Image (spheres, helix red, strand yellow):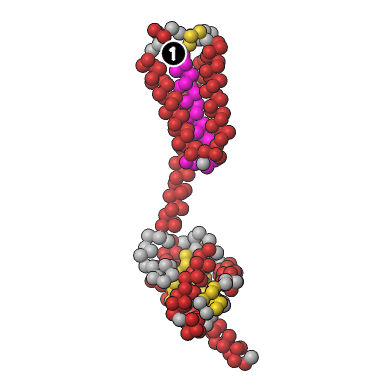
Amino acid sequence: MLQLHRLTLIAAALALVACVCLYASLGVAKPFAIWKWTDIVSEGGTAVMAGVWVLFTLSSRPGGLVTRLLAGGLAMIMIGSFADCLDEFFVISKTARWDHWLEALVPLGMLCVTCGMYYWRHEQFRLNEHLQKRERLFRDHRAFDRITQLANADYLRRQIRHEQSLRPGRQCALVLLDIDGFHLINRAHGQREGDRVLQAVGHMLLLNLRNDDLLCRYAGDRFALLMPETSAAEADALARHLSAMVGQMRHHAKDGRVHITLRHASASADQAPDVLLAQLGRELALQAEAKSAGTASA
């Protein structure tokens, strides 16, 4: 992360070197006997700690307003405290204003850090809000399907109800995806290979989903996809994309390649979960019957 802030670190280092050159060229060195070690340790220690905090900040954050304010403010405190420490080694004319301006960097830096903390606070509020939204996807994931490690049907029903209560009147869609002829895969290649197919399809679906979408294994060879802030038309388009991605998979069993295709049904998630799932299940069954009839007539 420090590589992203290389120029900032170089500028801070050059500022410290410039301070030393400035005091050494325009000041008069004090005798060792009159050095005030208490002031040297306190002011120099403040500069060192501020420098360490600059490194901590830059090594843990990407660029942005908050990072600039925090790191810039701490850098000013570091330079101002360092200049204040150099006063213990050099005598500077009382008419030299630049010395006072350098020392004034400390309160100015504290102001910048305060502004950075203010914006950082708002940033944390937004992150916490996002984490609260994401928490619902993970807090109850003890309800895992053993084969695919996806959430199961009970968890899906709870999340549908949660979405409906959390965002009443807002768009939310549900898609049901079914593997065509899955029983034939089990019959031809065995149940263990069928389980591998379920796992492969689950992984492919996950790779092509958005962060806020929830994928579950609904039952047997059926997967359910809950998509907040999504219309039924958008969900149908995404389901077609997912079906195309799965159709391009090259899944190989011990005795040959397994060709996998999906059919899907989608609807707005604005009904009771059981009613909605039953409706989508009937649509999938009708698609399967139509496909079987078409195959038989051909």
- Number of marks drawn: 1
Q: Which residue is mark 1?
A: 88
User: Looking at this rendering, what residue extends furthest in the bottom direction?
Assistant: 297
Residue ID at (57%, 29%): 11
Q: Quadrant of residue 289?
A: bottom right
Taking the magenta stretch, the answer to whether it contains residue 75 is yes
Residue ID at (47%, 70%): 199
Residue ID at (44%, 72%): 217
Left or right relative to 52: residue 259 = right
User: Looking at this rendering, what residue extends furthest in the right direction?
Assistant: 298
Magenta: main secondary structure:
helix
Identified by mark 1, the residue type is Glu
Residue ID at (39%, 70%): 146
Q: Locate residue 213, reporting x and y percent.
A: 49, 63
- Camera-side residue of 262 and 101: 262
Q: Is residue 58 visible?
A: yes
- Camera-side residue of 185 and 269: 185
Region in magenta: 60-87
